[in-house]
Image (spheres, helix red, strand yellow):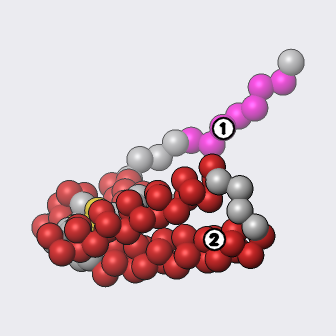
Amino acid sequence: MMQSVSPPVSFSMTSELNSAVTLDSALPRRRRIDRNAGRALELLGHAIEYLTDEFVYEGCSQASLDSQLEAIQLLMALNRQIYLECPEVKSIGSRILARFGIQGS
């Protein structure tokens, strides 16, 4: 049985920080949602849920199904637009890196 030889492992602070920055940018960002945006997202969520339930549980004609799908997609796009317009909240990792003057994402 042949054993594979792995390359030596090196630990450097810069590679660790670079991987932390890369990992931080891959994670989803939280958003600060104000009262008006929150209410809009809530109402849109209820409307999307209602139309989706109706779409799944009721048998309708093909033309009706197409229009329901179009309405659901329109509401989902509006929901996403409102959410993405809310400002991002920097992660604690980004704030720590910025405190030390390291450019993060």
Disc 1 packing (10 Å; few <14; some 14–19; many ≥20): few
Residue 97 appears anywhere in the view = no
What is the quadrant of the C terminus in the image? bottom left
Amino acid carrying mark 2 in the image: Leu
**Position in image of residue 42 (x %, y %):** 30, 63
Q: Could you tell me how many numbered marks the image carries?
A: 2
Q: Quadrant of residue 7?
A: top right
Amino acid carrying mark 1 in the image: Ser
Q: Does the magenta stretch include residue 19?
A: no
How far apart marks 2 and 1 lie (CA) works out to 53 Å
Left or right of 65, for residue 27: left
Q: Which residue lies furthest to the top in this view?
A: 1
Disc 2 packing (10 Å; few <14; some 14–19; many ≥20): some
**Position in image of residue 68 (x %, y %):** 61, 71
* Residue in view at x 46 percent, y 57 percent: 49
**Position in image of residue 101 (x %, y %):** 18, 73
Disc 1 marks which residue? 6
Left or right of 11, for residue 43: left
Q: Is mark 1 on a helix, strand or loop?
A: loop
Task: Give the mark nearer the N terminus: 2 vs 1.
Answer: 1
Q: Are marks 2 and 1 in contact (CB under 8 Å)?
A: no
Residues in magenta? 2-8
* Residue in view at x 62 percent, y 59 percent: 55
* Residue in view at x 23 percent, y 68 percent: 39
- Asked if residue 1 is positioned above or below residue 23 in the image, the reply reads above
Left or right of 73, for residue 32: left
Task: In the rendered structure, find residue 26 and report the number of the disc placed on it.
Answer: none
* Residue in view at x 71 percent, y 62 percent: 60
Residue 105 or residue 80, whichever sits in front: 80
Q: Quadrant of residue 34?
A: bottom left
What is the quadrant of the N terminus in the image? top right
Disc 2 marks which residue? 69
